[in-house]
Image (cartoon, coloured by chain):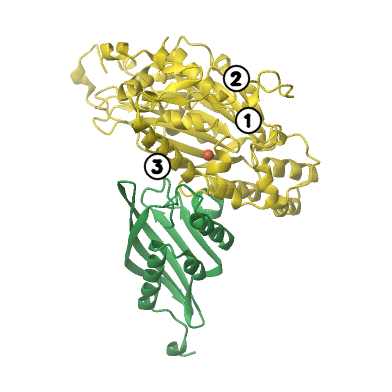
Chain colours: A green, B yellow
Amino acid sequence: MEKTATNAISLDEAIRFIWREAELLDTQDYAQWLDLWTPEGLYIIPIDRDGDARIDQLNVAYDDAEMRAARTKRLKSGFSMSSAPSARTVRLVSRFVEEAGDDGSLTVRAAQQVVEYKFNRTRLLGADVTYRLVRDGDRLRLDHKEIRLLNSDDSLWGIGYLL
Amino acid sequence: MNDQQAEAIDFGELVQSDRVHTSLYRDPAIFDEEMERIFKNTWVWVGHTSEIPIKNSFVKSWVGDKPVIVTRDKEMKVHVLLNRCRHRAASICEQKSGKTSVFVCPYHGWSYALDGKLRAVPHSKVYGEDFDKEEFPLISLRTEIYNGMIFATFRDDIEPLDDFLGPAKKWIDLFMKQGAGYPVKVLGEHQFTFDGNWKIQLENTTDAYHFPIVHKTFLDSLDSETTNIFDVLGQGGWLEDLGNGHSVMVMIPDLVDLDENLDAPIPERFEALAQELREEGHDEDKVRRMVRAVGGGGFNLNLFPNVACSMAFFRVLRPVKVDQTEIRHIAIGMDGGPDAANRVRLRLHEHFQGPMGFGSPDDAEGWERVQRGSAAGDDLWILVNRGEQPLEGHAAGEHVTDVSAETGMRAAYDMWKKVMTA
Ligand code: FES
Ligand SMILES: [Fe+2]
């Protein structure tokens, strides 16, 4: 097939998708966020920054579709002390680098800074993030997101929102 | 703090049988005294033997506010060493865990073996003839182990660990049954800090009262069968003072002994795991044993002052400042056991524990709220008078109290008082 007629995803298209996802997370529009995902997609926040067999390691989060749905339901329930209210967040995602792509998918690496604020306290979480995006008809979907926090193997704190 | 200040505080007055004084959460002078009188005078949990599985392995830890390295030397002997060079105090190890035959101080290059002995000193001639390396090993704490749990103490003259644990040993043995025939092994750990006093966490491990309130959203995320299992106040559980500040809180009596009731139906949420284990060729008996153990035991064993065997994991606290504490939730599994079963254990741990679990962030928020609220009055008291009357005719004995009683807190504060006024 001709290159021009493929489903290839451009970096520009990927960045627009990632920024939209970032805004959905800051505004905590979790229903829309869930809809970004493929059914098989995994949302992972590892502890070990170098490992790759996440399934056999302890992670901060290792969410399939069911766990994502349960997690967002919990955060929005109003009954969780740490997320009612949760910290407010503002995040920046940048330093985009294309990793690998094929017809219909693209993996992108990026840097993320999340600033959170709650009860007189402002804190910062830095991370390297990897996204795998896939084309689904006229839209993109998130098929994999791994957030490697700078301090993932050190003490964190109760985080009442999504990274 | 100077001695005068310490003497001015009447520690005995601050802890009464049914209440403790708010200054226990807030006074930096009390915190400093606790680090001396408690953490330098009793057995303190530092690690699990599976964290140093082979010779020349090590893992960093703490005894109160003192940094230590837990090591296994080339003869397989376990040591707990202060992480402090004998020359001019530099920390000699900043790696969390690993394997080495020698620690080399990065400042002037003194090197130490894993048993603490000073092996080499660069340009040692300048020290003169009478410099004796044997005089400057890393400070080694007295170390004893019970069923894989490693404890250390600064004191050479206190009772053996066995006596300190006393009746708690039976519960440690029960807890370790979740290895389901395999040795228990550390699989990883969550770490988080909260801005609050360490004793707020010590209390919480023996606080079933908060569970249905604080953990409502965790309970809501479970299937109905599992929600019933986690009805921790409604199953006839109990709380028992085990002496020396230790206590056990039984929330799910059916899961006290994981070797029993193996004929019971397999819970729906573990059916897929059971099938996978059968397909791997494990016989039905072993499958049932592993599946029953995979969710952990039905109790929290609280050991004074810093560790709990909490259902399916170790919960370790480290006092950082009067109003800051670090918590470790150490996941455990079956050493050499089937990956499928250990994976289930990891996912269950992630579900509740850690910085983004469905339980821990709400706990941490609650503990911070205690610290924030306690600013409202140093002349007020913390009530720990819930459930003082023993349960009548309970199968566990005459002295046990309701599962939601504050008996475990009273036990811990009794010990606090004993040690602080000794
Ligand atoms: S401080 Fe360690 S060698 Fe000098
Ligand atoms: Fe809790």
Q: Is residue B365 visible?
A: yes
Q: Identify which residue is drawn at 53% across, 13% down.
A: B160
- The residue under label 1 is B403
What distance separates the C-alpha of mark 2 from that of mark 1?
A: 14 Å
- The residue under label 2 is B242
Q: Do tags 2 and 3 sit on the same chain?
A: no
Between B329 and B364, the residue placed more toward the observer is B364
Q: Is residue B209 above or below residue B2?
A: below
How many residues crowd around disc 1 within 10 Å: few (fewer than 14), some, or many (20 or more)?
Answer: many
Q: Which of the chains bears the disc numbered 2? A: B
Amino acid type shown at disc 3? Ser
Instruction: Locate residue B289, reporting x and y percent.
Output: 73, 40
Q: In which quarter of the image is residue B164?
A: top right
What distance separates the C-alpha of mark 2 from that of mark 3?
A: 31 Å
Which callout, 3 or 1, points to the residue nearer the camera? Answer: 1
Instruction: Say what secondary structure mark 1 lies in.
Output: loop
Q: Identify which residue is drawn at 37% across, 76% down.
A: A11
Q: Is residue B73 above or below residue B267?
A: above
Q: Is residue B146 visible?
A: no
Instruction: Say what secondary structure mark 3 lies in.
Output: loop
Q: Which of the chains bears the disc numbered 3? A: A
Instruction: Locate residue A82, reporting x and y percent.
Output: 45, 48
- The residue under label 3 is A155
